Image (spheres, rainbow, N blue to C red):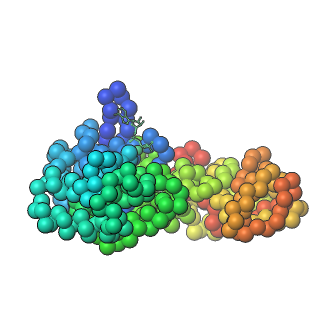
Amino acid sequence: MIHLNLEKLSKKYPGGVQAVRDLDLEIARGEFIVFLGPSGCGKTTTLRMIAGLEQASGGSIVLDGRDITDLAPRDRNVSMIFQSYAVWPHMTVAENISYPLRLRKKRKDEIAAKVEHVAAVCGIGEYLGRYPAQLSGGQRQRVAVARALAVESSLSLMDEPLSNLDAKLRVSVRTFLKEIHRESGATTIFVTHDQSEAMALADRIVVMNGGSVEQVGTTRDIYNRCGSLFVAQFMGTPPANIVDVSLESVGGRILATAPGLAPLDLGPAKASPEMAAFAGRSACLAVRPEIIALGPAGGLNPATISLVEPQGAYTIFVVEVLGGEWKIMVEGDPGIEAGRAVSLSIDASRAMLFDRETGKRL
Ligand SMILES: Nc1ncnc2c1ncn2[C@@H]1O[C@H](COP(=O)(O)OP(=O)(O)OP(=O)(O)O)[C@@H](O)[C@H]1O
Ligand SMILES: [Mg+2]
């Protein structure tokens, strides 16, 4: 069932910045949606329009079948945690959490029960009487999250709620957010530019670029079936390596070739008519670092390892190949040193091909 429907939603700020452009998105009830994209791509602006803090310059926002595009924020039944979250220093934890409920003139006993419950869920139940200055940064963040949860809105918007936390705490709070979502089932839109966070949390990820939606899909879709070159180069740590290739149709199969690259068999031409139509033309091949294996030198593509970045569970090699620099990810520590010549073998079945002009997936 559709809970929130954004149709051709646009925002042009006075001064001419087109922050959001014709954004179409349908969100089902209970979904955990993550907006992901580079700085300035319009994530916060979109959230602020949904919350009613920013007037849309075009398009519509429909929540629960009701057009809320021009409603005041308090009439929307939407709660938002801001990018620069604030807990009030002069209020205790309990007062902070209950503040929006008191504003809404809820009954005292109802408020008390609610505060106790969300504080317990957020793991700050024992700090209700403390002031924010007597808490750690992570605990303060939980107060902000608890305050948003207490409101029990039908739609919860979170703008980089974890960005002020250190790396370790960030991972634990995100696990806890996922648990809360599983319990509450509230439709959630969560903004981040941390892709590991996005992939871990999302039912669906919305990748934004320059005010528009670039691709919407599950983590698996976004990572393995990138809709565009932008997504292939944006997703992944490190992101996909890109090389210009020529496509040929040989014996009913499609081969990708580039000077110095062993021809890659991309599969039967029959199976992918769009690709076959590209035969004789050039395209961009995106190769994820983990679908490349390192072998002894001697292949068609001599590469030199210029840097080794050990990560414990895996190792990243920076190699000079095909006139550029590629990053390759290998499990464990294969004990290969910088300066060594190697050859690369690519798992062609997992490589992705894009139209060089439009950037779209072939
Ligand atoms: N009040 C404003 N007036 C004019 N331009 C604005 C205003 N707020 C944001 N912008 C511009 O709109 C664009 C989108 O901004 P927005 O804050 O939505 O980006 P974002 O995706 O949230 O980025 P970040 O990841 O850095 O938070 C940017 O180019 C920004 O400079
Ligand atoms: Mg922002």
Q: Quadrant of the N terminus?
A: bottom left
Asked if 299 appears above or below 245 in the picture, the reply is below
In the rendered image, which quarter is residue 93 located in?
bottom left
Compared to 251, does 226 lie above or below?
above
Query: Is residue 156 visible from the viewing direction of this image?
Result: no
Residue 295 falls in image quadrant: bottom right
Q: Is residue 174 left or right of residue 331?
A: left
Residue 146 % position (x, y)? 31, 61
Q: Residue at x 34, y 43 (%)?
A: 45
Q: Can you tell which quarter of the image residue 189 is in?
A: bottom left
Instruction: Please identify the residue farthest to the bottom as the structure is shown.
Output: 183
The x, y position of residue 246, in whole percent, is: 69, 52
**Drawn side of residue 323 relative to residue 57, left or right:** right
Looking at this view, is 355 or 4 the one in front?
A: 4
On screen, residue 268 above or below 25: below
Ligand 1 picture quarter:
top left
Residue 33's spot in the image, x, y percent? 37, 60
**Residue occupying the point 63% across, 50% down:** 283
- Seen at 16% across and 46% down, the residue is 71
